[in-house]
Amino acid sequence: MPALAQIHPLNTASSPQHDLIRIRGLDKTYAGGSVHALSNINLDIKDGEFVCVVGPSGCGKSTLLRILAGLDDYDTGTAALDGKTISGPSRDVGVVFQAANLLPWLTVRENIALPLRVGGKQVGQAEDIDRLLDVAGLKDFGERFPYELSGGMQQRAGICRALVRSPRVLLMDEPFGALDALTRERMNLELQRIWQASRKTVLLITHSISEAIFLADRVVVMSARPGRVIRELEVPIPRPRSNDTIISHPAYPALAKEIRGLLNASGDE
Amino acid sequence: MSQAQTTIIADSVSIERAATKPKAKAKDGKGVNGTAITLVGLVVLFGGWSLAVKYLEVPSYILPTPLAVWKALWSGIAVSPSSPLGYYLPLWGTLKNAAIGLFLGSALGLTLGSLMAESRLIEKLIMPYAFALQSLPKVAIAPLIVIWFGFGDGSKIAISALLAFFPMLINSFTGLRAVEPERIDLMRSLSASRFETYRIVKLPNAAPFIFAGLDMAVVYALLGTIVAEFLGAQQGMGVVITQAQAVTDVAGVFAALVILGAMGILLHAIVRGLEKKIVHWGERGRK
């Protein structure tokens, strides 16, 4: 296993206090204005911060992620990445999709290398694919095809693919939602390890309160449609966290209770 | 185009898609029992055929015995490949023209199908004609093509290309449109160009559809060549059949049909083999 801190040496230099993502008064409607997806979203994410967004189904959290990824547009307000208004997909953003979304006709290595093959001339740094495979525990699976891998391994490859252009921001849309509970816990550990090594800025969307608390520096709770940010909660639990120590931390039950209360009050389940 | 027309065309596309979607592989009697049943079936068929011809006193110019067909077949096979009496020269002529027609027709079908899938404008421009021509029995155009291209190889190639064109057009169009939106999102998030998305995602994604189209196109191309040869040709399996028919050599006609049947099975097997090798992910590529 290589020294993980070496993977993304450039990003560690930037100031952790700087707001990398800044969202102000963001509004989004669908279907000619009849579906109000997002309403007056204000959110700042610091460079190197890990933010989890939780909210009821259909609260527009995926829409928020798609807007930040440059895949959807928005009606009013602003969304900016490092001071620049987001107007389309960017090299600075890596997206991890639900259910891995690997291409079955490419090997794992080819899937991970895909972002380096497309999208015009390559500026900026590229990760070493062997090192990424190694970090993700896929060292011996580079020449396999996705369907030969377990769901957890596929999603690890999906994360490698999002990291290969060495983006500053990682956007993850319920990346472990399709996995069983045990695999999911292990993936959370792995993701924490990868994040601690790379110090990317991460926005992760999840349904799971325990996953949000485990991973996040800050949990953002959204309301049912139209999606609004109803509370932001710092997670004061020191890292590295483990699945055993996190639930025994004194702050955990209160946090979980508060998030659950907010979600219930906003009409979920 | 009116809304109603658009709906009709959309419906026909989905019907075509349902009809040509690669089916889940059924176990087609591969076990010992399956083989035994097939063999018993063959024996019963040929035995019944022989007995029926013999005891019902069917004249040989109506239905020859299996033995007579076998003799005719053997006389065409057990000769030098360059003999004008053997099947080799006419078969080569037919296969060559069918192959050229297949190549031209499917290349054109794939190209136009791709353009239609990529551009709504081209789709709206071409789709009405495609469906009008599709519903026309295309072998009926064959005499016209013979007028245009003459009795040489040209008309054979043109008709087989025409017949091979349609399944490739419709299947490649349908397959290229059937791509999962998540895969398009992935390519968009990477700022991939349109051609990169086509080449890396849409084309492989459509491969099962394209192979299903190719499977049909192979048979149609062979059919097109034979029909053109019926209308007039110097050589080819179609000529072998019409010549045998002219002298009421029904066993000779049967023998030629056996050869064509074997060719059809062989070509089908080649396409399936290619598909298995290229589309190695199979059904696992779909959600």
Image (cartoon, rainbow, N blue to C red):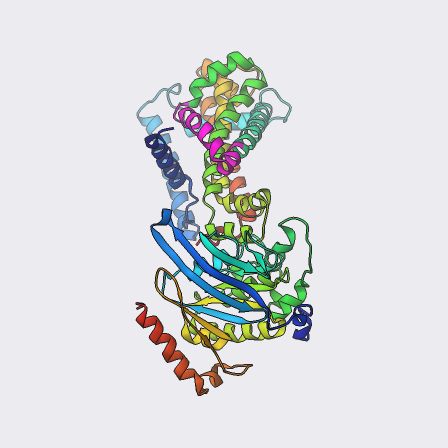
Left or right of B232? Residue A82 is: right
In front here: A21 or A165?
A21
Q: Which residues are magenta?
A: B112-137
- Total marks in image: 0
Image quarter of residue A168: bottom right
Asked if residue A190 is positioned above or below residue B201 in the image, the reply reads below
In the image, residue A126 above or below residue A269: above
Q: Magenta stretch mostly in which secondary structure?
A: helix
- Residue A182 visible, this orientation: no
Residue A93 is situated, as x and y percent measured from the top left of the image, at 58, 59
Q: Indicate yes or no whether the magenta region holds residue B122.
A: yes
Q: Is residue B95 magenta?
A: no
Q: Can residue B188 be seen by looking at this rendering?
A: yes
Q: Position of residue B201 (x, y in %)?
A: 54, 48
Residue B47 in the image: above or below residue A52: above
Q: Which residue shows up at 48% across the image and 81% down it?
A: A243
Q: Is residue B2 left or right of residue B200?
A: left
Spot occupied by residue A148 in the image (x, y as percentages of width and height): 53, 61
Q: Quadrant of the N terminus of chain B?
A: top left
Please give the name of the residue rendered at 38% of the width and 51% of the height, measured from the top-left corner.
Answer: A30
Is residue A263 or residue B56 the one in the foreground?
A263
Residue B141 screen position, x and y as percent: 45, 18
Q: Quadrant of the C terminus of chain B?
A: bottom left
Q: Nearer the viewer, residue B147 or B107?
A: B107
In this view, B227 is above or below A157: above
Q: Residue at x 56, y 55 (%)?
A: A85
Quadrant assignment, res B47 = top left
Nearest the viewer among A58 and B71 is A58
